[in-house]
Amino acid sequence: MDESVVQAFWERVARGDADECWIWRGGTNAGFGQFTVATQPKRVRRPATAVSWELAGRTIPAGHRIGSNCGGKLCVNPAHLEAQTQSDYARWSADALKQRFWRRVSKNPDGCWEWDGHRSALGYGMTTYKSRSIGAHRLAWILTHGSIPEGMFICHHCDNPPCCNPAHLFMGSPAANSFDMKNKGRTRGRRGPGSAGARFTEDEVRSFRARYAAGGVSTHQLAREAGVASMTMWRMLVGRSYADVA
């Protein structure tokens, strides 16, 4: 590889000690480092891990990709890299996701495990999974038990929205979720008397509408904050739902 290309690559790396992660500071794709190499007749984007691997004098085996064994998507320290098959990579991705998720949970050995990251206006932990916003308690269920059937809810025995303790969660149908909300008194002040499907209190409706009217915030941003679908937020903001709230 041309010396100028090698220099350009390492200029984009924050190098630490030999046993530390060396973090890629250049372009990314899906959270992984990407390095653009000028070739004829076009420029080629390559994984930064693969370039680092080759600069260390190693060859990439056929059918393999280069990934880090430290859990860092942007780490390009050759000492932290390994050739992985697709199944190795899938297993690493799942393990890394679990590590990143549970690092953001405060585990009380005798009670709730609360989410330390962003929370919605309703108090639920919010995170990202497969490029989509998702409740932290739902992802906790997925990481522990597997996928959630379409239309099913993940409810809390403890009635503590930010709790991600799998022992405190249970899966329920929409009807079971509504019954659980009524039992716990979470429908008071909602849209219409006894409405179990309401997502906002009257104060929350007024607050979101005022912020939206003031400008500077999108429907999508407010929906993410509240932990609801963008369409649900839009319908509330424009008065298609909660029309009785002034």
Image (spheres, rainbow, N blue to C red):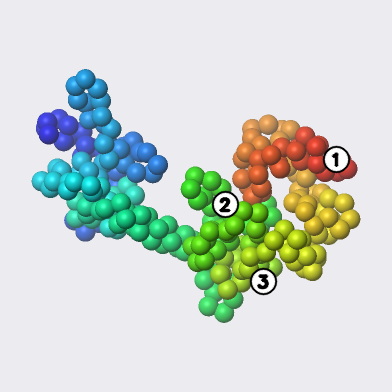
**Above or below: residue 35 compared with residue 101:** above
| Residues tagged 2 and 3 counted as in contact (Cβ below 8 A) | no
User: Does residue 21 appear anywhere in the picture?
Assistant: no
**Amino acid carrying mark 2 in the image:** Ile
| Residue 125 higher or lower than 213, as above or below | below
Is 121 on the left-hand or right-hand side of 65?
Answer: right
CA gap between label 1 and label 3 equals 32 Å
Q: Are marks 1 and 3 in contact (CB under 8 Å)?
A: no
**Image quadrant where one finds the C terminus:** top right
User: Looking at the picture, which amino acid does disc 3 mark?
Assistant: Cys
Position of residue 56 in the picture relative to residue 142 (left or right):
left
Crowding near pointer 1: few (<14 within 10 Å), some, many (20+)? few
* Residue under numbered circle 2: 134
225 lies left or right of 205: left
Asked whether residue 3 appears in the rendered view, the answer is: yes
The disc placed on residue 243 is 1
- The amino acid pointed to by label 1 is Ala
Q: Nearer the viewer, residue 148 or 94?
A: 148
Of the two numbered discs 2 and 3 on the same chain, state the one appearing first in sequence: 2
Q: Position of residue 55 (x, y in %)?
A: 14, 43
The residue furthest bottom is: 110
Q: Secondary structure at mark 3?
A: loop
Q: Residue at x 22, y 54 (%)?
A: 82
Seen at 65% across and 58% down, the residue is 152
User: For numbered disc 2, what is the local secondary structure?
Assistant: strand
